[in-house]
Image: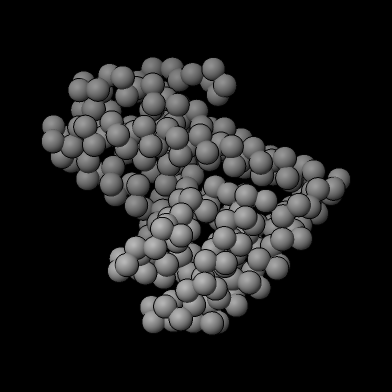
Amino acid sequence: MTDHEQEYAKMARQVYRTLTDQRPQWEARSPAMVADFEQLNNFLQAYDEVSGRQGTKSAKEPSDARDRAEQAAEAAAGRIVRGLRVLQLGVRNPALAEVAGYTPDVLNPLHGEELIGALNAVAAAADGVAPLLANEGVTTEHLQALDDAIAVYTPLASLNNSTLEQGSNLNFTARQVVKGLRQVLRRLDTRIDNLRDDIPSLGQAYNDARAAAEVGDLAEGEKGPDGGIGRAAAGNAYGPERPVGE
């Protein structure tokens, strides 16, 4: 699993801990939120199970190389996309609109051919407006870095052999679990927004939890013995939790 997926799961754990701590307040005003809260716990338990079942080192090494190449390509594309977004602040170019929207939240869930397509779209768009990008600090070195990253990632993206099979399957499962985390957190974002006026402290605590992983605040030692999830965190206080998959 990628560094981004691990950081996203850490952030989700922090959100779960925050909601656990303040459950008496929000549950009284939004009983329907309990289902999303429990679903968040279920996805976190599933993530931990997948994480604990990662393949042997020999199976993981090629997959890890692919993940590193993927992250490098996303980072190179991200620098150019930021420049394209600045260009859109002036005379809006409809041809650049889609590519300028390739934020990390858009690129990170993409893998394999889908990501290659997005990376190539960024590279092509950048080539067409290279002089304008140079005025925004996006240099020829930045453009070359993306081309190089695409060249490294492309042959790794489609690896599929017996050595990779276990690691790849687990990585795919991890990605599906993280996708589920994204979906339930978007639902919780909407519910928390609706509670901000009634419970300002909850809104601020939720914001802090959502931002924590992005600024590196979630050290391993801060998660507690259960990582902020599971029965020890909430089950004893608020009743039994549903097993994963129900």
How far from the left and from the top, in percent, is residue 93? 39, 63
Nearer to me, 65 or 133 = 133
Residue at point 28%, 47% (across, down) = 207
Quarter of the rendering containing residue 188: top left
In the picture, the quarter occupied by the C terminus is top right
The residue at 39%/82% (across/down) is 135
Residue 236 shows in this picture: no
Q: Using residue 57 as the reference point, say whether residue 171 is left or right of it.
A: left
Q: Position of residue 146 (x, y in %)?
A: 59, 71
The spot of residue 204 in percent (x, y) is 22, 45
Specify whether residue 183 is in view. Answer: yes
Q: Which residue is found at the position 45% from the left and 26% from the top?
A: 39
User: Residue lying farthest left?
Assistant: 197
Using the image, determine if residue 200 lies above or below residue 92: above
Task: Tell me the quarter of the picture where residue 145 sits.
Answer: bottom right
Is residue 211 rendered to the left or right of residue 158? left
Relative side of 134 to 152, left or right:
left
Indicate the position of residue 18 as horizontal and vertical percent values.
Answer: 32, 39
The way the protein has been coloured in the rendering is one colour
Instruction: Name the foreground residue: 237 vs 169.
Output: 169
Number of numbered callouts drawn = 0
* Residue at the image point whose x is 48% and y is 50% from the top: 106
83 sits to left or right of 203: right
